[in-house]
Each structure stands twice: as C-alpha cells, then as structure tokens.
Image (cartoon, rainbow, N blue to C red):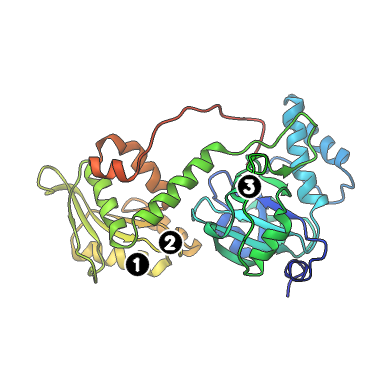
Amino acid sequence: MTSASHDAANNTAPSPVWLVRAGAKGEDEALALELNLAVIGFTEIPDLTGVSNREAVLERVQSVSPDARPNRIRNRAGQLNAFVLRMKEGDIVALPFKTRPGHIALGCVSGEYRYERIEGVMRHTRPVDWIRPDVPRSEFGQDLLYSLGAFLTVCRIKRNNAENRIAAILARSRDHYRAESNEHQRPADVDLELEPDDEAAPDITQIARDQIFEHIRSRFPGHEFAQLVEAVLQAEGYFTLLSPPGPDGGVDILAGSGPLGFESPKLCVQVKATANAVDVTVLRSLRGTMQSFNSDQGLLVSWGGFTRDLEREARQSFFTVRLWGADDFVDAICRNYERLPEQIQNDIPLERVWTLVRDDSEY
C-alpha cells in the first residue's frame, strides 16, 4: 500500500497533492508515463541541483531572464521551487492529460529532483510511480477538476479537502464529496506561495475543451464516433463511404476528393473510439489497408491517443499518414463547425468566445 493510500485508509495527515503538467500540448505525457517521471518544461533554466531555498531558485531564474516582468519571474521561480524543494517522496502527483482527454494520471513521487538528459535535451524531472495512469475524469468532483485546470505547470492542490479526496481516488475509492457553495467552486484552488494579490488562474481554454471532450465522448460512442468523423471529412470537401457497424476489414471510412470521390487525395480512414492509446499494430494495419485499396494517404483517428512506439514509427509515414488524437479532432470540428450538418451542430452546441490570454505562466 502506498503512503498516500495508507493516509486515506487511516485518516492520518494526508500527503500533499501536486498538479504537474507535461507540456503545453501534452507533448511529454507519453514520455512521463514510459519513463516513470514527472517531466516539466523550463528548459532554458539550468540545473537546480543543490539549491537550498526559494531565494536561490529566484536568483537562478532572474539570471536567465533579467528583463522579464517581476511577476513572471516570481511565478516561474515559485513553480520550480515547488518542483525541486517542496515536493517530497510520497507526495501525490496528478497529471491531467491533453493527449488523452477524459483521463488523469495519478502517482506518487519516488525520488529526489534530477536534471538529466532525455532524448538529447536536459530536463527537470522527478521520479514518479504512476499507480493509476488512466483515471477517468468522471471519478473527480467538478470542484477538483477546476483545481486541476489551473493555468500552471506545477502547483499544490489543497482546497475542498482535495488531499484526502485524491488519495482516496488513488486507492480506488470514489470521490463522494461535492462542493455545496460558490466559495468551494472557485477554480483558483492552488497554493504556489505567490504574492497575496496573485492567484493561479484557471486555464479557461482547457476547461472549455475538457467539457467539449467529455460531451463528444459520451454523445458519440462506438460507431457513432466514426459517423462524426465522416461528417467532419465531408465538411472538409471529401466524398465518403462509411463501413457499417461490425468488422470493417481494416478501414472505417473511404474518402476521395472531387464530386464523386474519384480524385486525389484518396484516403483510408481508421477510427478508434476507445479510451486506450492505440499501438503500432494499428498503424501497420492501416498501411496495409492503404495498399489494398490503392489509396494515396491514410488517416488514423484515435480518441485515446497513441503510444510512443506508434508516434515514432508514424514519422516514417509522414507524407502518407496523418494521426488525429482527440485534440486534433476537436480542432477539426471547430474549423469546420459551420459546415457540419445542423443535426450535429445541435448535438454539439458550440459558441466562439474570446478570452484574454495570460502570458505570466509557463505550462
């Protein structure tokens, strides 16, 4: 039993919970899980091994960005101080996925800060035992999801009894708590040791996208997801043929350009609606199907994302195969929204909203 699970079971002082993201677009998420690490950005900041206090971290950040605004410097130093010094072995780490919307990875810190070379780049890391790497977001109360949507790379999650509740989820218990007041629903549910007039604002864009992801996931299961992909391709100008439910012979959608679909590019499209990342065998199957149908190109759409092995091998097929994860697919819906059938617009009611972009935080 982990120390966090033990705390939850015995009502002892809970382990601190840290939100730690893995790239502005989730580019390091698969890497983090594969290597059992928390991996953050800040790649321009040099090695912080041996720093002993927040002031030393602040000096290191200032030396790299002497002309940056004071608030930005404090913000970055606060996040790095939390990652290097405040985070302790046994603390809980939460990683909300961008590449696998609808899931959050939970684990426990298993070692000290390290500055190490990963894929040719020096990175700031902490060893993490990812105990539950695929927790559905539905297991978390909405107030916790707001907290986990903070517009930061690293911060501590505390309000609304978050530490005990997330420890319980880590131990595979349900989150029975639900906030009952507006105060509890405030999204600035983090502790970063910032100045009193500073708050870690929520990433409104990510919260909105999370809502879209969850709506599509629940509204378009299985074959209905393939129908939605077909509608998006038709909106982009393709003439399509959708396979019926059941075995599809390796292709869910055939799509061609031109009024009757006889013109290039001609696509073979494979669609995976499951929450799990698809592996390289799916990519290889698609390439074989492309040869059978004499198609020019292929499109692999996976709601659960892709394994790192698949992404590496897909580089070899850059000019013939495209990968759409959930984020790419939502982007495709948004850029074609006004051309989608009215019924789909009714099923996915979206409205464009302009919001101010904060630039004083690093993901």
> Is there any visible trace of residue 176 in the rendered image?
yes
Q: For mark 3, does the 10 Å Cα neighbourhood hold few (<14), some (14 to 19), or many (20 or more) residues?
A: few
Q: Is residue 46 left or right of residue 107?
A: right
The answer for how far apart the CA atoms under marks 2 and 3 are is 49 Å
Task: Using the image, tell me which numbered label, if any, was put on residue 50.
Answer: none
According to the picture, the residue beneath numbered tag 2 turns out to be 313
Residue situated in front as seen by the camera: 207 or 115? 207
Of the two numbered discs 3 and 1 on the same chain, state the one appearing first in sequence: 3
Whether residue 115 is situated above or below residue 174 in the rendered picture: above
The answer for how far apart the CA atoms under marks 1 and 2 are is 9 Å
Whether residue 90 is situated above or below residue 161 in the rendered picture: below
Amino acid type of the residue tagged 2 in the rendering: Glu
Of the two numbered discs 2 and 3 on the same chain, state the one appearing first in sequence: 3
Task: Using the image, tell me which numbered label, if any, was put on residue 180.
Answer: 3
Amino acid type of the residue tagged 1 in the rendering: Arg
Q: Is residue 249 left or right of residue 214?
A: left
- In percent of the image, x 58 and y 64: which residue is there? 133
Q: Nearer the viewer, mark 2 or mark 3?
A: 3
Amino acid type of the residue tagged 3 in the rendering: Glu
According to the picture, the residue beneath numbered tag 1 turns out to be 284
- In percent of the image, x 62 and y 69: which residue is there? 172
